[in-house]
Image (spheres, rainbow, N blue to C red):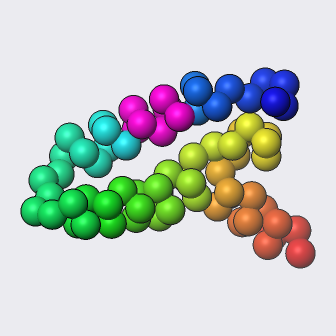
Amino acid sequence: MIRGLDPVRDAREVNATLECELLEASRFKTQHEAALAVFEFIEGWYNPRRRHTSIRHISPMELERRMAQAA
């Protein structure tokens, strides 16, 4: 394991954010609808916007913006 990374803590953070931001505020008619909402939340909001320690605590969107400005 890479020093400083804690996959259990990271999984708990994702679950807590998902529960608070999506699941408590939504009602789903089908399991498929819920699964789609979870996928869209993770890929559309959580992964691109959350800060990553591997890229100096900035979001991937911010990294891409900075790289585009530097180019």
Q: Is residue 65 left or right of residue 43?
A: right
62 in magenta: no
Quadrant where the C terminus is found in the figure: bottom right
Image x and y of residue 61, in percent: 64, 61
Q: Which residue is painted at 88% across and 68% down in the image?
A: 70
Residues shaded magenta: 11-17
Looking at this view, is 42 or 29 the one in front? 29
Image x and y of residue 65, in percent: 72, 66
Which of the 4 quarters of the picture holds residue 67? bottom right
The answer to whether residue 59 is above or below residue 53 is: below
The answer to whether residue 67 is above or below residue 26 is: below
Which of the 4 quarters of the picture holds residue 29? bottom left
Q: Is residue 46 left or right of residue 55?
A: left
Quadrant where the N terminus is found in the figure: top right
Image x and y of residue 48, in percent: 58, 58
Q: Which residue is painted at 47% across and 56% down in the image?
A: 42
Instruction: Decide whether the magenta segment is chiefly helix, strand or loop.
Output: helix
Looking at this view, is 71 or 32 the one in front? 32
The answer to whether residue 57 is above or below residue 33 is: above
Image x and y of residue 39, in percent: 41, 62
Which of the 4 quarters of the picture holds residue 66? bottom right
Q: Is residue 69 left or right of residue 44?
A: right
